Amino acid sequence: MTTDKQKQGTVEILKHESEILKGNPLGDENIRDLIIYLPPNYEAETEKRFPVVYCLTGFTGRGKMLLNDNAFTPNLAQRLDSLINDGSIKPLIVVMPDCFTYYGGSQYINSSATGNYEDYLTEEIVSFVDENFRTINDKNSRAVMGKSSGGYGALICGLRHADKFGLVCSTSGDAYFELCYLPDIPKAFRAIRGNPQAFMEKFWREEKKGKDDFPALNLIGMSACYSPNENSEVGFDLPFDLETGEIQADVWKRWLENDPVRLVENHAADLKSLKLLYIDAGTRDEFALDLGARILCKKLKDLGVPFIHEEFDDGHMQISYRYNRSLELISQNLD
């Protein structure tokens, strides 16, 4: 936690108006809070430029949540202050975007059911930050990190946008979809009760949530990202039959096309161009993402892609302390 003796960074909360998100299919707001952490002495050192880290939140998260106050856990700004002050990391600019949607998240990819959030992040936000802050505008001084769906988004940036992000850190990122998503289908089936639209209206209307409501939201949110369908009444296809719960093989195939374990084969050259690819997960992850990380890393090894893989003794929740490790590795590998 930051003490009075430590130099503190500055947090700016900007209202960014997106052209890319204007008119998105869900009618979500296109004016978003964009959180920028500026390191201590940013204002004083007027000629100095700084590397940038983009920190992506998990499903149902948005950038401002990284600044939540907690008596026992430092928020991201406090964490950065401490790491910079004790010399663990170099001074960094850290960007916390908002890619939340009505369905809970965007997975940081483009979809006709949610909007073009991949373009929003990699084109609009990156350009805006470079134009308005003293960044080092070079891929090897630009990193992306995140956990859970944020870790998935970081991997997507490395796979498809290695020309912009030279350092990628994924903590418990979605990978090997068979293990992390299929077990929630029975729960989602029972909560949705044949009508995803009615479920979503109830989910937003009623403050008290049922025990299977979040698995249902997760399956709906992922369907909107991985299997959009402009001809469907709801704009996407679920990977299971609404009457029986049977897995729909054609839809599930579309999901797998978005799985990092499958994507790496066509993006090995992009991944090899990274200065850092770091993947970690807890050995008690409730969504088996530690196994997903192992499977992904075996693929990377077979393809000759350099990476760092670590595991830690914990589950999926309340693991923001792992940000420290990502930030330290980013700092060590920056140009």
Image (cartoon, grey):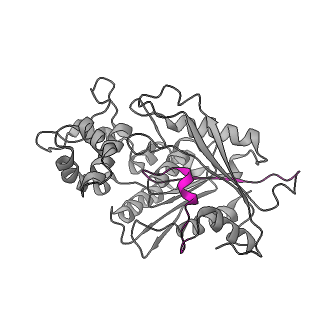
Q: From the top left corner, tell me how far across and down residue 41 is, in percent.
A: 82, 60
Total count of labels: 0
Residue 256: tell me if it is visible: no
Locate residue 184: give its quadrant. bottom left
The residue at 47%/44% (across/down) is 100
Between 87 and 141, the residue placed more toward the observer is: 87
Which residue appears farthest toward the left when viewing the image? Answer: 244
The residue at 73%/54% (across/down) is 51
- Quadrant location, the N terminus: bottom right
Which secondary structure dominates the residues rendered in magenta? loop
The residue at 53%/41% (across/down) is 160
Q: Is residue 7 left or right of residue 315?
A: right
- Quadrant location, the C terminus: bottom right
- The residue range painted magenta reads 46-73
Q: From the top left corner, tell me how far across and down residue 301 is, in percent.
A: 47, 59
- As for residue 48 lying within the magenta part, the answer is yes
Residue 220: tell me if it is visible: yes
Between 175 and 186, the residue placed more toward the observer is: 186
Q: From the top left corner, tell me how far across and down residue 152 is, in percent.
A: 46, 51
Q: From the top left corner, tell me how far across and down residue 108 is, in percent.
A: 49, 43
Q: Is residue 23 left or right of residue 206?
A: right
Image: 44 above or below 121: below
Locate residue 175: give its quadrant. bottom left
- As for residue 326 lying within the magenta part, the answer is no
